[in-house]
Image (spheres, grey):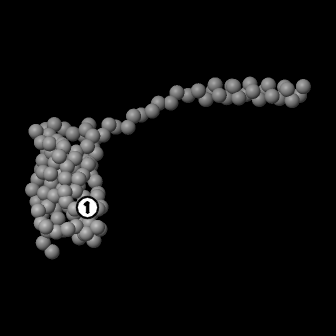
């Protein structure tokens, strides 16, 4: 009888405690991301070593005389030769239609800058592309 009473009390306590823990939980959805895609290319007939690193950044370059704001980036270990495909995810809520955005690319070997783009590559707004963007980089003097 004592064991039966103990089981009934334990069962009632579990029901009571589970009812007290009936909190509503809300899930905040992750921000929707979109991506800008393209290729990094160069014209020199030079093979990249396997330790070459390609860095590509999406930047807001709207502010004059101020550093660009990086909205997304990708670092790629160059496991193959040019063209080197890239895909940079960014939050479309950060894009302001009257701002100017560009993509920059650089290739380093053993930490030393070897190639970089020398002209602005405009993207996203003002009729500029967000897919199949080609970034031409030029060799940097040693």
Asked if residue 55 lies left or right of residue 28, the reply is left
Residue ID at (25%, 43%) = 35
In the picture shown, does residue 70 fall above or below 5? below
**Rendered location of residue 58, percent (x, y):** 22, 49
Residue ID at (19%, 49%) = 38
In the picture shown, does residue 32 fall above or below 88? above
Q: Is residue 81 visible?
A: yes
Of 17 and 104, the residue lying toward us: 104
Q: Picture quarter containing residue 41? A: bottom left
Q: Quick one: which residue is furthest to the right in this view? A: 1
Q: Is residue 62 visible?
A: no
**Rendered location of residue 131, percent (x, y):** 18, 43
Of helix, strand and loop, which one carries label 1?
A: loop
**Rendered location of residue 68, percent (x, y):** 19, 52
Q: Quadrant of the C terminus?
A: bottom left
Q: Picture quarter containing residue 20? A: top right
Of 34 and 61, the residue lying toward us: 34
Q: Quadrant of the N terminus?
A: top right
Q: Quick one: which residue is furthest to the bottom in this view? A: 142
Q: How many marks?
A: 1
In the picture shown, does residue 64 fall above or below 11? below
Instruction: Say few, some or many: other residues with alpha carbon within 10 Å of mark 1 (under 14 / 14 to 19 / 20 or more).
Output: few
In the picture shown, does residue 80 fall above or below 38? below
What residue is pinned by disc 1? 80
Residue ID at (11%, 62%) = 43
**Rendered location of residue 59, percent (x, y):** 20, 50
């Amino acid at each position: 009888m004592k064991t039966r009473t103990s089981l009934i009390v334990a069962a009632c306590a579990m029901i009571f405690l589970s009812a007290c823990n009936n909190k509503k939980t809300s899930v905040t959805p992750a921000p929707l991301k979109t991506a800008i895609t393209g290729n990094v290319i160069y014209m020199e007939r030079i093979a990249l070593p396997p330790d070459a690193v390609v860095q590509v950044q999406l930047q807001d370059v709207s502010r004059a005389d101020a550093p660009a704001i990086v909205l997304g980036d990708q670092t790629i270990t160059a496991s193959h030769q040019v063209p080197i495909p890239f895909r940079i995810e960014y939050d479309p809520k950060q894009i302001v239609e009257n701002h100017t955005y560009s993509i920059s690319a650089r290739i380093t070997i053993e930490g030393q800058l070897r190639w970089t783009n020398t002209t602005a590559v405009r993207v996203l707004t003002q009729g500029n592309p967000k897919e199949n963007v080609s970034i031409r980089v030029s060799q940097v003097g040693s």
